[in-house]
Image: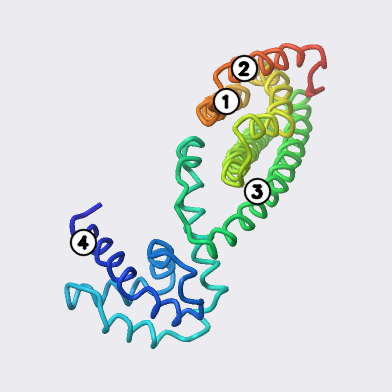
């Protein structure tokens, strides 16, 4: 973070501490319900441009900044906007971060915001798991489409059919990456919603890991068939690479190393059992 930005952040916190009750009233919040850190989050979301402009002009934040906030429409200073500011902040602490780091990012919110956050995290967790289920279904459909065009290519290895297979492989990879993203997000929101690392890992194993273990085995054989027919394909390699990342992050998020070893053993066993279920009929 640049020095000027550090000065601004420090000034914004000091401003929030000094004018906390007045700022709370401007946002239609009962004084005493927020902490200064809460107000910093709210101001960054609803009035950051105004605050930065005042700070750049004056070198500090004071009554002029209060006047700027007062000029913001009341609709942008509603409790709904406050809730959105916290949701935006929570997403920044959660998405695209390693799970254990996301778990450790736990701001000390005041009671009002903590109640909002707790409810919102649970809703976000549930919606993300629904998205994961949808993403997994889309991946399965894309694999079926790949199987279909692969059969056409087997019977007629023309350039057009080869191109269609490559396009289908690309679609499968995109859908698998999407499912992985939703899986990591689901695990992260589970942890932030208060679930233990063990429970989050079990949920992932149930709704995601078991399925991709089976897919990896089937797609590994399909990769080999495609490669033997002159088409580059690393779908199974991609699945296993992403799964390894998720496994490690779940272990780091879990404080019980004994369970971590058992978890890896169970996943290895599941992967071994996947051989018994056969493979997709792709050729």
Q: CA distance from mark 4 to mark 1?
A: 40 Å
SS at mark 2 in the image: helix
Q: Position of residue 211 (x, y in %)?
A: 73, 28
Q: Nearer the viewer, mark 3 or mark 1?
A: 3
Q: Position of residue 170 (x, y in %)?
A: 61, 37
Compare marks 3 and 1 and give the one earlier in the sequence: 3
Image point 81% across, 12% down: which residue? Answer: 276
Task: Reply above or below: 116 against 31.
Answer: above
Image point 46% across, 67% down: which residue? Answer: 34
Q: Quadrant of residue 168?
A: top right
Compare marks 3 and 4 and give the one earlier in the sequence: 4
Q: Position of residue 5 (x, y in %)?
A: 24, 60
Residue 264's disc is 2
Left or right of 179 in this view: 273: right
Can you see residue 94?
A: yes
Can you see residue 76?
A: no
Residue 7's disc is 4
Compare marks 4 and 1 and give the one earlier in the sequence: 4
Q: Residues within 10 Å of mark 2 (few under 14, many from 20)?
A: some
Q: Which residue is mark 3?
A: 125
Residue 70's disc is none
Residue 247's disc is 1
Q: CA distance from mark 3 to mark 1?
A: 19 Å
Relative depth, front residue between 273 and 194: 194
Q: Residues within 10 Å of mark 1 (few under 14, many from 20)?
A: many
Q: Nearer the viewer, mark 4 or mark 1?
A: 4
Q: CA distance from mark 3 to mark 4?
A: 35 Å
SS at mark 1 in the image: helix
Compare marks 2 and 3 and give the one earlier in the sequence: 3
Image point 48% across, 58% down: which residue? Answer: 109
């Amino acid at each position: 973070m640049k020095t000027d930005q550090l000065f601004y952040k420090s000034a914004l916190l000091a401003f929030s501490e000094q004018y906390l009750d007045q700022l709370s009233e401007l946002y239609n919040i009962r004084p005493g319900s927020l902490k200064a850190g809460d107000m910093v989050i709210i101001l960054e979301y609803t009035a950051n441009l105004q605050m930065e402009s005042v700070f750049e002009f004056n070198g500090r934040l004071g009554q002029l900044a209060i006047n700027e906030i007062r000029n913001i429409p009341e609709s942008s200073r509603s409790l709904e906007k406050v809730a959105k500011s916290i949701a935006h902040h929570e997403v920044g602490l959660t998405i695209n971060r390693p799970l254990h780091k996301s778990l450790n990012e736990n701001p000390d919110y005041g009671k009002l915001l903590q109640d909002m956050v707790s409810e919102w995290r649970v809703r976000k967790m549930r919606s993300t798991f629904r998205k994961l289920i949808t993403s997994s279904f889309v991946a399965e459909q894309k694999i079926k489409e790949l199987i279909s065009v692969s059969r056409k290519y087997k019977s007629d290895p023309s350039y057009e059919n080869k191109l269609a297979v490559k396009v289908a492989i690309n679609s499968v990879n995109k859908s698998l990456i999407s499912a992985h993203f939703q899986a990591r997000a689901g695990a992260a929101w589970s942890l932030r919603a208060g679930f233990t690392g063990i429970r989050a890992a079990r949920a992932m194993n149930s709704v995601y890991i078991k399925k991709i273990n089976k897919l990896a085995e089937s797609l590994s054989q399909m990769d080999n068939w495609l490669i033997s027919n002159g088409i580059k394909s690393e779908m199974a390699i991609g699945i296993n690479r992403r799964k390894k990342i998720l496994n490690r992050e779940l272990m780091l998020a879990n404080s019980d190393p004994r369970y971590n070893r058992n978890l890896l053993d169970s996943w290895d066993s599941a992967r071994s059992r996947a051989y018994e279920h056969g493979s997709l009929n792709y050729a």
